[in-house]
């Protein structure tokens, strides 16, 4: 394990690649916009989770664990992706309407996270790779604590939701509380109380377990490593093109998303097809499980396996087309 991040000068690659794609493929603008049908998916997934929660109250707790891991985690992970869509204003035109539908996602997650995610995820895009300003990068203390031990990395992944929840504490100059976050917390407390009183504690436990598994040591957990953990020299963002995109609203198309955050989930595969010369040469993945296993068991991988930009500079020129990589589809 290296004892620090990989430092490079200048801005992230997405700025130049976006300019290059716009220059060669101006038709990409037709993919930008909003998809109001995303709201129907939110309502449907929340309703489905609440129905399942009402059905598990009479079964043994061990089966609740199994159902939460094998089924509920997929639905709650999808809802986190839809919170992500709301965060970027890709559902409705009005900002407040996007915030409201994001808060509704939390009804099945049992944790009031939509508004806090919105605040800090937008900072992640604005300050990608800037330590202390990008909330997606761990602190030095956390990185040293996890180290490169397989069992410590596995535990860290299991409790990844806690790591994410504490990450805002390291972001400089940003006040956590605002009226929307307060509203998010109060509304979710009311929803959780209603679930507890109307459906029972087992139902609330099912929803919470589904969220913990969706964000942790689970085949879906490979996503958190896939997005920005360094496995190809100089490449700070990676896409996943495997079958689980069908269950996760194309969240694996992460290079594409960072290049064009105003393209909704349904158009991300079209973006890649429109400009293959910009994406085909980048390393990508086909298996989140393989990504997760490599992170845990590869002693060269740790939470320090990230690119950090030493200082922002002027935007680079249009990004050149990447050369083909022999490691493009590994692991």
Image: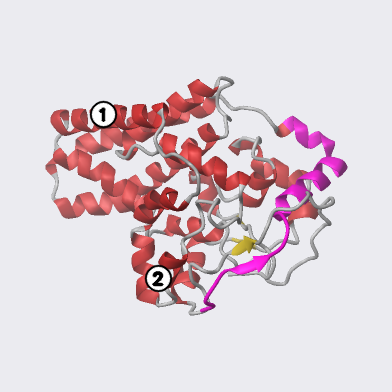
Q: Residues within 10 Å of mark 2 (few under 14, many from 20)?
A: some
Asked which quadrant contains residue 57, the reply is top left
Q: Where residue 263 sits: x, y (%)?
A: 66, 36
Task: Give the distance between the C-alpha atoms of the residues marked 2 and 1, in whole angstroms.
Answer: 35 Å
Location of the C terminus (image quadrant)? bottom right
In this view, the residue farthest toward the front is 173
Q: Secondary structure at mark 1?
A: helix
**Relative to 198, is 125 above or below?**
below
Residue at figure coordinates x 56%, y 20% from the top left: 94
Q: Where residue 38 sits: x, y (%)?
A: 52, 29
Asked which quadrant contains residue 264, the reply is top right
Label 1 belongs to which residue? 191
> Which of the pair 178/194 is nearer the observer?
178
Residue at figure coordinates x 14%, y 30% from the top left: 197
Is residue 160 highlighted in magenta? no
Q: Is residue 248 visible?
A: yes
Give the residues drawn in magenta, as a range: 1-30
């Amino acid at each position: 394990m290296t004892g620090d991040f990989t430092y490079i000068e200048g801005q992230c690659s997405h700025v130049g690649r976006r300019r290059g794609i716009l220059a060669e493929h101006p038709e990409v603008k037709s993919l930008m916009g909003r998809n109001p049908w995303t709201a129907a998916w939110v309502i449907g997934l929340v309703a489905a989770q609440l129905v399942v929660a009402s059905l598990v109250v009479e079964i043994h707790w061990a089966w609740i664990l199994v159902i939460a891991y094998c089924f509920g985690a997929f639905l709650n992970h999808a809802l986190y992706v839809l919170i992500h869509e709301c965060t970027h204003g890709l559902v409705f035109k009005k900002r407040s309407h996007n915030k409201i539908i994001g808060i509704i996602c939390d009804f099945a997650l049992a944790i009031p996270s939509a508004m806090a995610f919105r605040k800090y995820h937008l900072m992640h895009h604005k300050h990608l790779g800037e330590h202390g300003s990008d909330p997606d990068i761990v602190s030095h203390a956390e990185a040293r604590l996890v180290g490169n031990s397989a069992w410590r990395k596995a535990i860290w992944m299991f409790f990844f939701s806690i790591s994410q929840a504490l990450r805002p504490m390291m972001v400089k100059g940003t006040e956590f509380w605002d009226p929307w976050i307060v509203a998010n917390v109060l509304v979710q407390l009311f929803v959780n109380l209603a679930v507890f009183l109307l459906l029972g504690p087992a139902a609330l436990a099912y929803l919470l377990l589904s969220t913990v598994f969706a964000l942790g040591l689970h085949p879906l957990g490979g996503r958190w490593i896939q997005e920005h953990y360094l496995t190809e020299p100089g490449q700070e963002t990676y896409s996943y093109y495997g079958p689980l995109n069908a269950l996760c609203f194309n969240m694996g198309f992460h290079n594409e998303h960072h290049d064009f955050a105003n393209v909704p989930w349904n158009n991300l595969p079209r973006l890649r097809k429109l400009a293959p010369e910009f994406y085909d040469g980048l390393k990508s993945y086909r298996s989140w499980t393989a990504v997760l296993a490599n992170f845990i068991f590869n002693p060269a991988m740790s939470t320090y396996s990230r690119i950090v930009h030493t200082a922002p500079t002027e935007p680079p020129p249009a990004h050149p087309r990447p050369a083909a990589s022999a490691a493009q589809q590994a692991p």
